[in-house]
Image (cartoon, rainbow, N blue to C red):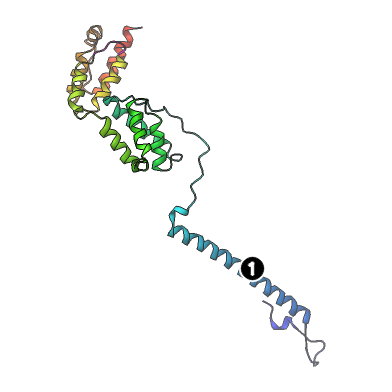
Amino acid sequence: MEDLQDFVNFTDQGQTPYFNVHAMMNAVIALGRHQGQFAEYQARANGLLDTLTQRLVDPQSQPRPPLPTGQVRFHKPRVFNGKAEEVVPFLREIKNAVHLQRRVLLDDYDKVIYMSTYLKDGSPSSWYNALDVRRSPLLFNFEGFVEDFKHHFEDSDLVSSSLRKLENLHQTGAASSYASRFKELLVYLDLSEQTKIAMFHENLKSDVKDLLITITPSKIFDVYINQVVMVDNRLHE
């Protein structure tokens, strides 16, 4: 800011001073410009404050985040065929897929629609169509939708039936395929490591059992599975 002496000129010593009108006008113009900038900044601040207040009051007014440009690569879930033993692995694959696509499947309805595309024609799709026709609230509640699905398709005596299927399961092809099916049935059972190993070993092919005698079997089920698969692969080399 200019001092008073910037606006006052003294011609000669002893003479009456006079005001520098040009300098004073420049100062007034500069002051007006600063006031205009201040008013503009204040208007911007008020606008931002109004927007923030609106979002706090109404969170739904916030725009959805932009969709990601890249796509996550993963194995698609199996198509559910209506069998009770497929419920748990199917739901596990669906939930994994939903999580990996969480930036695309933004609300419960999106997730429900996604899951419905993996329901096979027949009882699975008929169950979904019944909910869709009457616009059931479950269409907008993914967890409730999943619970109703489980109630409709899951075996009420899943433990007993899974144990029976496990006892009747035999290795007929590759040990890896036998192990995969064996593990699927284990999901419903609470067995010790020793029991799992004993049951798995019981129904292996006889030539695989014979070759297993030459190694020290692990007491950890997953490690034992790997040993069996290696032995089985060796037989087919």
Q: Quadrant of residue 86?
A: top left
Quarter in which the C terminus is drawn: top left
Q: Residue at x 40, y 38 (%)?
A: 111
Q: From this view, report whether residue 185 is shown above or below residue 207.
A: below
Q: Residue at x 28, y 10 (%)?
A: 172
Residue 222 on the magenta span: no
Q: From this view, report whether residue 180 is shown above or below residue 45.
A: above
Task: Label 1, secondary structure: give it.
Answer: helix
Q: Where does the magenta region start and end?
A: 170-174
**Mark 1 — residue?**
37
Quick check: can you spot residue 21?
yes
**Residue 124 % position (x, y):** 33, 28
Q: Residue at x 69, y 81 (%)?
A: 3
Q: Main secondary structure of the magenta part?
A: loop
Quick check: can you spot residue 191?
no
Which of these two is toward me, 155 or 127?
Answer: 127
Which of these two is toward me, 219 or 119?
Answer: 119
**Residue 144 % position (x, y):** 31, 41
Which of these two is toward me, 221 or 109?
Answer: 109
Which of these two is toward me, 237 or 191?
Answer: 191
